Image: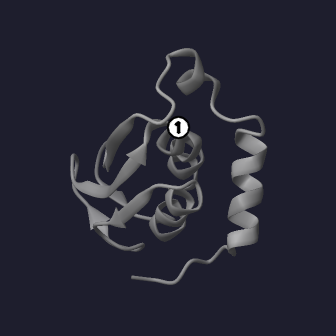
């Protein structure tokens, strides 16, 4: 795996910019504190980029994450790229920013 190109400080700023007051979807659906898991998969053939930062975002949000591949890998359509697990609020807090980085 490559090291993160962005510092924790920068990643925390990205999270704060995206969800400065917490994730409203999680709160409105009553999912706060409930366990969850997610997978990122390729939506077509792609060269993976930013996956290390995406995994770190989930960790900074309070979840655990595992990058299955590293940046620069060519992935096929449907390939599993990243998994994350934790509370629904932690997952929702990080997923959009992580998706945008990747």
Q: Residue furthest top?
A: 28
Q: How many marks?
A: 1
Image quarter in which the N terminus is found: bottom left
Residue positioned 24% across, 54% down in the render = 80
Residue positioned 21% across, 53% down in the render = 79
Give above or below for 84 relative to 8. above
Q: Is residue 41 left or right of residue 51?
A: left
Q: Is residue 46 left or right of residue 87?
A: left
Residue positioned 71% across, 41% down in the render = 18
Residue 40 x/y as whole percent: 34, 48
Residue 43 x/y as whole percent: 32, 42
Residue 101 x/y as whole percent: 57, 55
Q: Nearer the viewer, residue 29 or 84?
A: 29
Give above or below for 73 relative to 11. below
For residue 76, what is the image quadrant? bottom left
Q: Nearer the viewer, residue 32 or 41?
A: 32
Give above or below for 65 relative to 17. below
The colour scheme applied to this rendered structure is one colour
Disc 1 designates what residue? 89
Q: Nearer the viewer, residue 57 or 50?
A: 57
Under circle 1, the secondary element is helix
For residue 24, what is the image quadrant? top right
Q: Residues within 10 Å of mark 1 (few under 14, many from 20)?
A: many
Residue positioned 22% across, 48% down in the render = 77
Residue 100 x/y as whole percent: 57, 47
């Amino acid at each position: 795996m490559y090291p993160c190109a962005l510092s924790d400080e920068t990643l925390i700023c990205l999270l704060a910019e995206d969800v400065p007051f917490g994730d409203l979807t999680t709160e409105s659906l009553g999912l706060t504190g409930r366990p969850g898991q997610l997978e990122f998969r390729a939506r077509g053939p792609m060269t993976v980029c930013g996956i290390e930062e995406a995994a770190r975002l989930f960790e900074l949000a309070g979840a655990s994450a595992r990058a299955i591949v590293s940046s620069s890998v060519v992935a096929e359509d449907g390939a599993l790229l990243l998994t994350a697990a934790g509370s629904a609020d932690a997952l929702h807090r990080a997923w959009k920013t992580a998706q945008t980085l990747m």
